[in-house]
Amino acid sequence: LELRFLDIAFSALTPVADKSIHTFATDGNMFYFSTEQILRVFKQNAAFLDRAYLHSVLHCIFSHLWVGGKRDRWLWNIACDIAVEYTICQMGLDAVSIARDVELNEKFHILKKQLTQLTAEKVYRYFRVNELSSSGMEEWSNLLYKDHHVKWLGKEEAQEQMEEWLKISERVKTDLKT
């Protein structure tokens, strides 16, 4: 109920079991998952599954899958995950709250002092200018890890999905206003 404005977005991805991945992934059309990972995570922390799905849906809403272009892939992935996880933390939803949120919020607070907004593009530019050490990259990566970005395609390869998600994004914005 708290996320009813995302109803169309939540139903846009078709779940598909994929043995080639160890966690979750999306290409904007499918939500790929490892069956073993789903069972293991559900037993330990069911809220993480909801969080991972929301995480993937937000990547699609923010067009992260399609706008990476020629950016440094590793850095772009971290910037996208920071933007998505920051958004989730700002929602303050108990249903998707996880133990790492406290540590994440501390890191977001430090980063927010440098940037006015934590969008993927701004975070990416910030880390390009203020190089992130390999230990800093690893720390962010470990905190943020929810999904693989291996299924992400460029604008040319996924024009149809991108356009569909732009419509969904507009509908979400409209629903939020009302």
Image (cartoon, rainbow, N blue to C red):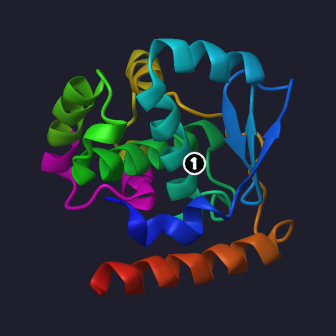
Residue 119: where, in percent of width, then height? 37, 59
Q: Which residue is mark 1?
A: 56
Residue 31: where, in percent of width, then height? 72, 46
Residue 97's image quarter? top left
Residue 70: where, in percent of width, then height? 69, 56
Residue 123 on the magenta span: yes
Question: Judging from the image, what secondary structure is the residue with disc 1 in?
Answer: helix
Quadrant containing the C terminus is bottom left
Residue 77: where, in percent of width, then height? 56, 42
Above or below, comparing residue 39 to residue 119 in the picture: above
Residue 12's image quarter? bottom right
Taking the spot 57% from the left edge, 48% from the top edge, the residue there is 56
Quadrant containing the N terminus is bottom left
Taking the spot 72% from the left edge, 59% from the top edge, the residue there is 28
The reply to whether residue 81 is in sight is: yes
Q: Amino acid at mark 1?
A: Ser
Taking the spot 18% from the left edge, 48% from the top edge, the residue there is 112
Nearest to the observer: residue 88 or residue 66: 88
Q: How packed is label 1: few (under 14 Cα within 10 Å), some, or many (20 or more)?
A: many
Nearest to the observer: residue 125 or residue 8: 8
Give the side of residue 33 with respect to residue 50, left or right: right
Q: Which residues are magenta?
A: 111-125
Magenta: main secondary structure: helix
Q: How many marks?
A: 1
The reply to whether residue 62 is in sight is: no
Residue 130 on the magenta span: no
Taking the spot 45% from the left edge, 38% from the top edge, the residue there is 51
Above or below, comparing residue 33 to residue 157 in the picture: above
Give the side of residue 158 with respect to residue 109, left or right: right
Above or below, comparing residue 42 to residue 153 in the picture: above
Give the side of residue 113 with respect to residue 86, left or right: left
